[in-house]
Image (tube, rainbow, N blue to C red):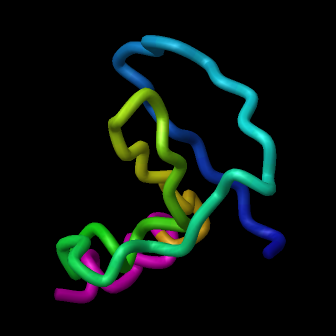
Amino acid sequence: RGESYGLLIDQIGEVLRLPEDSKEENPVNLDPRMAKLAGGVHRLDGQLMVVLDVDRVLELAPEMMAA
């Protein structure tokens, strides 16, 4: 959107390449605060991995600064 951002990452545990066709919509019982920032989920070995939507996170920054 024409703006540059930097993200500080404390640690990278594991990088995964996941097929787009295994991505699912957010479950209806996902915490609404997390669902607002999630771009979907993947099921991995019986666990649910929530995909963070970085654009949604960055949209929150101006709202948080205004509060």
Q: Position of residue 45 (x, y in %)?
A: 43, 27
On screen, residue 23 above or below 1: above
Which corner quadrant holds the N terminus?
Answer: bottom right
Q: Residue at x 36, y 74 (%)?
A: 27
Drawn side of residue 23 relative to residue 48, left or right: right
Give the camera-side residue of 43 and 50.
43
Q: Residue at x 48, y 34 (%)?
A: 44
- Residue 63 among magenta residues: yes
Drawn side of residue 29 relative to residue 59, left or right: left
Q: Residue at x 48, y 44 (%)?
A: 43
- Residue 18 among magenta residues: no
Give the camera-side residue of 14 and 2.
14
Drawn side of residue 36 relative to residue 5, left or right: left
Q: Residue at x 33, y 37 (%)?
A: 47
Magenta-colored segment: predominant secondary structure: helix
What residue span does the magenta drawing correspond to?
57-67
Q: Position of residue 50 (x, y in %)?
A: 42, 52
